[in-house]
Image (cartoon, rainbow, N blue to C red):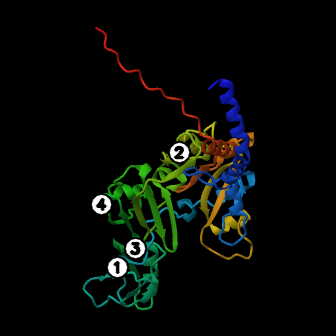
Amino acid sequence: MSERHRASRNDRRIKRALPLLLLAGTLLSGCGTPGAGPSAGRIERTANSAPQGNFPVVELSDRSLSLAGAGEPLGFASLGGRRFDSNVLRPGDTVDITVFDTGEEGLLSAASSKTLPLGKFRIDPAGYVTLPFVGRIRAAGGSPAALQSKIAASLKGSSVSPQAAVQVTETGGSGFTVNGGVNSAGRYQLTGQGERLLDAIAMAGGPKTAPGETSVTLLRGSSRASLPMDRLIAEPGENVYVQPNDQIFVKAEAPSFISLGAFRSPGEYRFETGELTMAQAVARSGGLADDRANPKKLYLFRYEPAETARRLGALPPNDSRATPVPVAYLVDMTKTQSFFLTQSFLMRKGDTLYAPNAGVINFAKALQVLNPPVPAPTYAAPAPTNSY
């Protein structure tokens, strides 16, 4: 067959298939091809299809960046807490109390000694102790010296020149616990040296895993905060003072994000030490594949707190849900401003980056399906000849 005849036959084949190709290109642009994921068009049609429960698409901008940052999980700094003062009595502390009377008449006038040990007393949960000759008296919240003055003042009616001595023998009200992935979990006492979170973890023998693979949770009363340990190390403001009755839980956890679609190296990547920005996450994934990706449509999928979703306009004002809301952030990487925005947008554990294929790539895939290349003709090898 001549080259001219073969080319003419291929032209006729393409003309007959062109309507099907256009239809297939349209369909593929809406649903993607196997293994490629949804197209940008399908994502945005799904997001805008209105029934409650569908996710919104929020274009990344200075405003949405600041609102997304406001949704960052609260760190330990939000809990505050002053340095532990070992000179302050607390519920659970045990005090040893002795009273003195230097006068000739009064409480101890008939005794051979002017000293009367009253004994050891534990401060009750309400902050009080009940003492002989004195009754119920407030102890918590003040110093041992302040309690001495209160006792002496209470004895003035029955003693000429009363005095009191208060010694703390057990600081049961200054304990905290460290549990989870540490080498020596247990309950420890604050010493008045100003122990912070990292000190408390060190007192428990340190974590069993590397800081980049460890998370720390602090429970204080009804408040709770969690952070990766490497962030706790990197940000001094998060290394807050430990308070009495704090519960610290250390957990082996390697936060990661997933990149899918038209990246050069899609996959799951662990966070490295410190913060990870969206720009860094794209780079870790090898960057967008120039021959496949649509640079105008880069998505980041995550769950945002309900309050953040409301500020972003992702929830109507009358929606009172409190559970996290799925949100898709859209970035147009053809805009110069996007490079600055993605350098400031912090990734979170569980985020998913998705780069859909460009529409022309889906069309090319359809072309390959409907018009496969003509295999090259094969010829039988000539039979070997014997020459003698």
Where residue 258 appears, as percent x and y from the top left, is 53, 51
Kindly state the secondary structure of the residue where label 1 is placed. strand
Whichever of labels 1 and 4 marks the residue nearer the N terminus, that label is 1
Q: Quadrant of residue 322?
A: bottom right
Check whether the beta carbons of the residues at disc 3 and disc 1 lie within 8 A of each other.
Answer: no
Q: Quadrant of the C terminus?
A: top left
In the shown orientation, is residue 28 left or right of residue 232?
A: right
Q: CA distance from mark 2 to mark 3?
A: 52 Å
* Label 3: few (<14), some (14–19) or many (≥20) C-alpha neighbours in 10 Å: many
Q: Which mark is residue 184?
A: 4
Amino acid under disc 3: Gly
Q: Which mark is residue 266?
A: 2
Kindly state the secondary structure of the residue where label 3 is placed. helix
Which of label 4 and label 2 is nearer to you? 2
Q: Quadrant of residue 90?
A: bottom left
Q: CA distance from mark 3 to mark 1?
A: 18 Å
Q: CA distance from mark 1 to mark 4?
A: 35 Å
Whichever of labels 3 and 4 marks the residue nearer the N terminus, that label is 3
